[in-house]
């Protein structure tokens, strides 16, 4: 790799992207340790190809003079991807797909390539991770039979750009950005500098040629390697494919979307023939025997965009033999758990501080909503006192620091999903009472109300459990 004499060295935090003139053990901006790494700055953006069109003098334009043209979105006919995209792919957009290794990113992108190729458009899939043969074997598993999807096993981005110029594809896929390099940049492959420059040149290329570019990036569970986090501000759309590799369920979350809402997400299950969109996620997330109530288990209904997803929360507490008791949250926010334990201890005098506490969300689903607070708290109280319900309980409500239970949004959708999945007993916030009564009357099911308990604060909830 060649180096220009004008190149400058600086240091970049791989977590937040802060730039420093010298190395630091701890990033001053985000406070992370050992994330600052050396980065070679190429003096002029010569490494980035500039077309003649780009060289034209740019002058400011009136908004009314800018032509919008027709909405040139490319619909994939994969609803679980089209919806989070905001209706389809916008030409010239750069989309970053993050996710842990092995979660299914390459699989999903190859399925998208197939969808585009089926519309008689050319796609170039470049992989720095797999050989052409490996990609072909995967494509065969996915049942892809198209000549419009070209594959290239290559890590040198300059060579990939040459092929793009020759082939002129509608879409370019880079799998993954950690395995790409620009020869003008001296930094090692996968280093923050290399990743940043590669992405910058891909973004430039996409805008110049009006070509869709999909960039795959790996993140670890801690999210602290050089990768997608650093790039989020450079691209148009950021998706994270999440899930637990030991389960089939996958969720495509939108972190950023310049062309649509970030509230939408895609739901899939991983099958032998690739990722398949689903519209009844609760069926995959609940255990088959969810009609048997066990101590320490509650059901919660979370919203993914406009869709309710039911999942089961399991709690376990045991007397700790460690100086600092263990807290483990799988599928649930660790900090949220710590707050809930503090509220339970302070407001209800439940001594969790000498217990090891484990929370698990069944099915590999990750709960992001505070609406699940009450379900987690009830699961904890129920296991602590070894009290089980006669029938499984679906609980909703956000818990404030003083132990009050706040109302949740979209009660109607959440409740209806619970009823659809045959749940009969609910604990809901007092603040949602009026709305819930209206819903039950609208559904012509006033009988449901006798099994719905409304609570104002945690004290009421614990009285309820202890009266069992
Ligand atoms: P992959 O797409 O390679 O993950 P990533 O690109 O995110 O690293 O997929 C990883 C796993 O998915 C792999 O262990 C095998 C499994 N898989 C299926 O279950 N079904 C399939 O059809 C394919 C192609 C893969
Ligand atoms: Mg892959």
Image: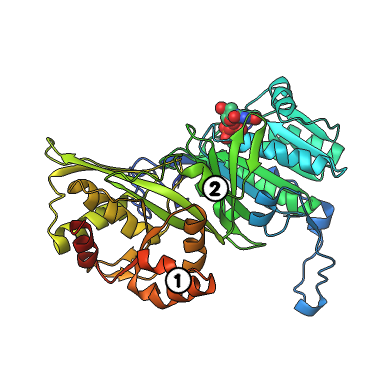
The picture places residue 178, in percent across and down from the top left corner, at 57, 35
Tell me which corner region of the image, top left, top right, bottom left or bottom right, holds residue 58.
bottom right
Judge whether 226 appears above or below 303 on screen.
Answer: above
Whichever of labels 2 and 1 marks the residue nearer the N terminus, that label is 2
> Which of 325 and 123 lies nearest the eye of the viewer?
325
Quick check: 298 left or right of 94? Answer: left
Which of labels 2 and 1 is toward the front? Answer: 1
The picture places residue 299, in percent across and down from the top left corner, at 39, 52
> Which of 153 and 344 lies nearest the eye of the viewer?
344
Mark 2: which secondary structure? helix
The picture places residue 107, in percent across and down from the top left corner, at 65, 34
Quick check: 282 left or right of 205? Answer: left
Judge whether 206 appears above or below 34 on screen.
Answer: below
The picture places residue 293, in percent across and down from the top left corner, at 33, 46
Judge whether 231 appears above or below 305 on screen.
Answer: above
> Which of 190 and 176 lies nearest the eye of the viewer?
176
> Which of 150 and 7 lies nearest the eye of the viewer?
150
Way the structure is coloured:
rainbow
C-alpha gap between disc 2 and disc 1? 27 Å
User: Total label count?
Assistant: 2
Instruction: Classify the position of the N terminus by image quarter.
Output: top right
The label on residue 281 is 2
- Residue at x 65% of width, y 34% of height: 274
The label on residue 446 is 1
Quick check: 458 left or right of 229? Answer: left
Q: Is residue 183 visible?
A: no
- Residue at x 80% of width, y 50% of height: 209
- Residue at x 65% of width, y 50% of height: 80
Is the shortest distance between ligand 1 and the CB of mark 2 under 8 Å? no
Callout 1: few (<14), some (14-19), or many (20+) C-alpha neighbours within 10 Å? Answer: few
Mark 1: which secondary structure? helix
Q: Is residue 298 visible?
A: yes
């Amino acid at each position: 790799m060649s180096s220009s004499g004008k190149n400058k060295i600086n240091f970049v935090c791989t977590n937040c992207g802060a730039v420093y003139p010298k190395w630091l053990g701890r990033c001053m901006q985000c406070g992370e340790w050992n994330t600052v790494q050396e980065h070679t700055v190429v003096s002029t953006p010569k490494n980035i190809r500039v077309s003649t069109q780009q060289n034209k003098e740019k002058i400011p334009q009136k908004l009314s003079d800018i032509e919008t043209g027709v909405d040139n979105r490319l619909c994939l006919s994969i609803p679980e991807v089209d919806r989070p995209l905001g209706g389809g792919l916008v030409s010239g957009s750069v989309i970053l797909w993050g996710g842990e290794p092995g979660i299914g990113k390459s699989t999903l992108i190859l399925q998208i390539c197939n969808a585009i190729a089926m519309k008689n458009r050319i796609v170039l899939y470049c992989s720095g991770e797999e050989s052409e043969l490996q990609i072909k074997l995967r494509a065969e598993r996915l049942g892809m039979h198209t000549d419009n999807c070209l594959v290239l096993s290559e890590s040198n981005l300059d060579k990939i750009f040459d092929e793009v110029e020759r082939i002129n594809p509608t879409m370019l896929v880079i799998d993954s950005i950690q395995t790409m390099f620009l020869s003008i940049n001296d930094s090692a492959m996968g280093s923050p500098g290399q990743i940043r420059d590669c992405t910058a040149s891909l973004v430039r290329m996409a805008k110049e040629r009006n070509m869709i570019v999909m960039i795959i990036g790996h993140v670890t569970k801690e999210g602290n390697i050089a990768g997608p986090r650093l790039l989020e501000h450079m691209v148009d759309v950021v998706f994270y494919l999440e899930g637990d590799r030991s389960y089939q369920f996958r969720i495509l979350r939108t972190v950023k979307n310049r062309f649509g809402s970030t509230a939408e997400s895609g739901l899939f299950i991983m099958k032998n023939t690739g990722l398949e969109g689903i519209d009844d996620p609760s069926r995959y997330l609940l255990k088959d025997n969810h009609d048997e109530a066990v101590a320490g288990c509650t059901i919660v209904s979370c919203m993914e965009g406009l869709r309710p997803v039911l999942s089961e929360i399991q709690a376990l507490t045991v007397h700790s033999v460690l100086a600092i008791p263990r807290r483990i949250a799988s599928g649930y926010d660790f900090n949220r758990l710590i707050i809930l334990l503090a509220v339970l201890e302070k407001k209800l005098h439940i001594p969790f501080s000498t217990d090891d506490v484990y929370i698990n969300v069944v099915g590999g689903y990750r709960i992001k909503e505070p609406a699940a607070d009450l379900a987690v708290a009830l699961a904890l109280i129920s296991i602590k006192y070894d009290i089980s319900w006669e029938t499984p309980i679906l609980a909703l409500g956000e818990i404030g620091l003083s132990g009050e239970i706040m109302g949740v949004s979209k009660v109607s959708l959440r409740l209806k999903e619970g009823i659809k999945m045959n749940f009969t007993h609910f604990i809901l916030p007092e603040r949602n009472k009026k709305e819930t009564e209206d819903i039950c009357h609208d559904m012509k099911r006033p009988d449901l109300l006798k099994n719905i308990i409304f609570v104002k604060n945690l004290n009421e909830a614990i009285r309820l459990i202890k009266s069992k």
